[in-house]
Image (tube, helix red, strand yellow):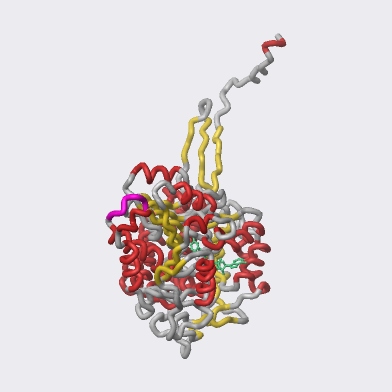
């Protein structure tokens, strides 16, 4: 690969790769580094800079050298909109090359193990997004609108304005797609970006930034730091970016919200629900879809189906048997049961035991997968479905446990009877995370009732509804929180990466102008 010396096919414990920060226009090592292990066998195959606060000063100074008016806007360096359009066109050409496409899919597989199908789809979505912003599309993205004024010479213009110095903090699970879609949006809108990705997977964006440079990206627009989460927290506190876009868990989101005084846009935890409605047909498709939503990439998607509400009509079908069948086709060998990077198998089992203790039962799965070299700090668990009775789940002492996000191949099943949909809706109302949801039914009255009483940001409706998939062509993000971010679309970029600035042009003082008379209260005349 011309733009890099990294080879995802040969890197291993015997031949580790040294990662570098990108700062002040150069790739630099830090004084200390930490080992990143291959999640499939525990070999220390990457050396990641463990950047200290002292070393981080350079990043903070560089970030804050960017004014609030950004690197470009419609009055300053407007040619940069074209420049980013050109760079994006070149990136699209590169991603069309099979070897570059595969390079990124393989890089993803090495640090966030998923089967090739899942890894390839991540690159596909990234490529489709890139294709959407070639040529003039970047300047169209930042388009303004005009409203005529009260008299000749006056026009108001609603512009999209950059924030200037901004940060992106990204999670491990979509190590290419999430940060690429966010940083490119930030750069298109004229911001200067400091990027930090999850330590386990930040290699991927290092490689992407090399590709950006190869395609002509200026070296002052984005810097990348590899460091621990807690060092990054201290950097955020010290640098006080004008805007921070965070994607990750809700606890960290709340902490960052506090230290940025709310200058944050959040994509946080997903506890995503799916409701199977009263029309229990097309069971084969729905069972296949349920397996995919719950267990693809081992359930490590923020959009994964965490809880499945099943109408009693499905009891007369073989839906659960077919769901179990599809889950049973998964294996560690093809990485369709991949290592779980944020829970151990013991953590998952402990959570399962709590559900069983409240009257739940394991429908399928429920055991760790043994006999592999996956390090003990990661989990490896069978695709698991645990049924909990609705009445138990609604109890205040049980509800928080039932609705805890397990970022692994773990799904809760709740059966409900005809006439009990309001109890299901009560559960969705009491949840804190409102990311994705699915109302699986072609009963229009049922679907509209559920849609009308719920809030999730990305909601799929209809017999073919899913919870995962999140392509670039529709909005993806939570609802019901003013800090909620979006990703992927024109609207998402405009909302997250620019603010509204109204410029009222008023150029024409008429000849012979005189001071207007002041109005007086007619009652006092
Ligand atoms: N809503 C979405 O679009 C979306 C997408 C993907 C993942 N997620 C969520 O992300 C979580 C899994 O990802 P994760 O394990 O990488 O999340 P995480 O919160 O542990 O880490 C996310 C990022 O924050 C950094 N970080 C951790 N502590 C920090 C601190 N104190 N200050 C600054 N940065 C800090 C991490 O290094 C990482 O880069 C799940 O909860 C999942 O639902 C949400």
List x then y, in percent, for residue 360.
48, 65
Q: Residue furthest right?
A: 524
Q: Residue furthest top?
A: 525
**Whole-percent x, y for residue 196 in the image:** 55, 68
Query: Of residues 453 and 78, which is closer to you in this image?
Result: 453
| Residue 147 location (% of width, % of height) | 48, 33
Image quadrant where one finds the C terminus: top right
The answer to whether 412 is drawn above or below residue 368 in the figure is above
Which residues make up the magenta segment? 276-281
Task: Tell me the quarter of the picture where residue 503 sits.
Answer: top right
69 left or right, relative to 325? right
Viewer-side residue, 170 vs 520: 170
Image quadrant holding the N terminus, namely bottom left
Tell me what residue is drawn at x 54 percent, y 79 percent. Answer: 48
Q: Is residue 297 magenta?
A: no
The image shows residue 312 at horizontal and vertical percentages of 37, 54
To which quarter of the image does residue 143 belong? top left
Residue 280 part of the magenta segment: yes
Q: Residue at x 41, y 71 (%)?
A: 383
Q: Quadrant of ligand 1?
A: bottom right
Main secondary-structure element of the magenta-colored stretch = loop
């Amino acid at each position: 690969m011309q733009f890099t010396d990294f080879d995802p096919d040969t890197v291993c414990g015997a031949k580790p790769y040294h990662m570098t920060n990108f700062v002040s226009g150069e790739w630099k090592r830090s004084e200390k580094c930490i080992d990143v292990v291959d999640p499939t066998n525990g070999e220390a195959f990457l050396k990641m800079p463990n950047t200290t606060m002292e070393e981080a000063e350079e990043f903070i100074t560089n970030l804050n050298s960017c004014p609030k008016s950004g690197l470009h806007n419609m009055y300053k360096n407007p040619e940069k909109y074209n420049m980013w359009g050109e760079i994006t066109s070149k990136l699209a050409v590169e991603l069309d090359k099979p070897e570059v496409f595969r390079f990124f899919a393989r890089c993803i597989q090495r640090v966030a193990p998923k089967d090739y199908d899942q890894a390839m789809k991540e690159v596909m979505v990234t490529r489709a997004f890139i294709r959407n912003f070639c040529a003039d599309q970047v300047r169209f993205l930042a388009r303004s609108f005009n409203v005529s004024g009260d008299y000749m010479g006056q026009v108001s213009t609603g512009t999209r304005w950059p924030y200037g110095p901004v940060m992106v903090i990204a999670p491990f699970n979509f190590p290419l797609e999430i940060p690429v879609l966010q940083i490119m949006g930030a750069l298109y809108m004229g911001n200067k970006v400091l990027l930090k990705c999850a330590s386990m997977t930040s290699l991927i964006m290092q490689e992407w930034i090399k590709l950006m440079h190869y395609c002509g990206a200026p070296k002052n627009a984005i810097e990348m730091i590899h460091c621990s989460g807690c060092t990054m927290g201290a950097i955020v506190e010290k640098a006080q970016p004008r805007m921070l876009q965070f994607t990750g868990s809700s606890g960290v989101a709340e902490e960052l919200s506090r230290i940025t005084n709310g200058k944050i846009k959040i994509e946080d935890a997903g506890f995503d629900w799916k409701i199977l409605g009263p029309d229990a047909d097309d069971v084969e498709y729905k069972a296949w879809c349920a397996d995919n939503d719950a267990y693809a990439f081992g359930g490590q998607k923020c959009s994964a189906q965490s809880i499945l509400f099943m109408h009693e009509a499905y009891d007369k079908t073989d839906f659960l048997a077919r769901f179990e069948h599809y889950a049973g086709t998964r294996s560690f060998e093809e990485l369709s049961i991949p290592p779980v990077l944020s829970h151990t198998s013991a953590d998952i089992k402990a959570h399962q035991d709590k559900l069983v203790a409240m009257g739940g039962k394991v429908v399928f799965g429920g055991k760790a997968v043994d006999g592999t070299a996956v390090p003990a700090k990661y989990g490896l668990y069978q695709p698991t479905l645990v049924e909990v009775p609705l009445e138990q789940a609604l109890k205040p002492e049980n509800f928080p446990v039932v609705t805890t996000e397990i970022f692994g191949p773990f799904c809760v099943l709740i059966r409900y009877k005809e006439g009990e949909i309001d109890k299901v809706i009560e559960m969705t109302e009491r949840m804190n995370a409102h990311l994705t949801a699915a109302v699986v039914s072609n009963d229009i009255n049922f679907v509209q009732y559920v849609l009308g009483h719920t809030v999730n940001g990305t909601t799929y409706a209809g017999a073919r509804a899913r919870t995962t998939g999140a392509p670039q062509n529709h909005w993806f993000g939570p609802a019901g929180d003013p800090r909620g971010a979006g990703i992927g679309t024109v609207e998402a970029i405009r909302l997250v990466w620019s603010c509204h600035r109204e410029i009222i042009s008023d150029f024409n003082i008429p000849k012979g102008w005189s001071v207007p008379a002041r109005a007086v209260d007619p009652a006092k005349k």
